[in-house]
Amino acid sequence: MKTAIIVLLCLCLMPYLLACVSGYYRQKQLGKVDNQNPRLQYTQLEGIGARAVAAQQNSWEALLIYSAALLAVVASGVIVEHLALAALIVLLARLLHALFYLTNLDKLRTLSFAIALAPCFYLFYMAIGYL
């Protein structure tokens, strides 16, 4: 369970790290970081800056799915034999997803998204099967 919780922490940090990346590109592309209207400024970004914003949004969504899957495991009380492995697969795939998003490798990004999603469904499956 410790590994799964550490992965949860890492996934919680990812959107903020990607926010730093998008902030860098807001400054670089637009000359300043507009904290009064940041969402409007995000829409003005192009290229890697726009992809950094999209990667950040996607990382929030992925965090929700992993959190729900982990909650299901904890709530069901099931002992998942490969919980640490599932968690590490999610983390590695999500890190690659962000990298592929930033570098505009769309097919690899989609593949890493699917790979990160699979262990989450495995955890739901294990939790439901235990009830």
Image (tube, rainbow, N blue to C red):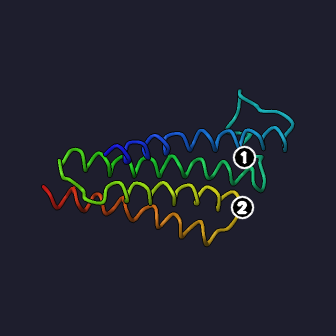
Say which element carries label 2. loop
Front one among 25 and 122: 122
How far is mark 1 from mark 2, CA to CA? 19 Å
x, y percentage for residue 112?
Answer: 53, 65
Kind of residue sitting beneath label 2: Thr
104 over 30 or under it: above or below: below
Q: Position of residue 46 (x, y in %)?
A: 78, 53
Relative to 15, is 50 above or below? below
Categorize mark 1 by other alpha carbons within 10 Å: few (<14), some (14-19), many (20+). few
**Residue 89 picture location, percent across and down:** 44, 60
Above or below, 64 relative to 109 = above
Q: Quadrant of the C terminus?
A: bottom left
- Identity of the residue furthest to the top in this view: 36
Q: Residue at x 64, y 44 (%)?
A: 18
- Residue contact at pointers 1 and 2, CB within 8 angstroms: no
Residue at disc 1, secondary structure: loop
- Is 105 left or right of 111, judged from the image as shown? right
Q: Residue at x 26, y 49 (%)?
A: 72
Q: Which residue is painted at 72% across and 46% down in the image?
A: 43
Judged left or right of residue 67, residue 33 is right
Residue 43 circle label: 1
The quarter of the picture where residue 96 lies is bottom right
Nearer mark to the viewer, of 1 and 2:
2
Q: Which mark is residue 82?
A: none
Front one among 73 and 80 = 80
Residue drawn at the location 43% of the way across and 56% of the way down: 88
* Left or right, residue 98 beside residue 124: right
Q: Earlier in the sequence, mark 1 or mark 2?
A: 1
Coordinates of residue 102 in the picture (x, y in percent): 69, 57
Please give the residue where the numbered disc 2 appears in the rendered image: 103
Q: Residue furthest bottom?
A: 107
Callout 1 amino acid:
Thr
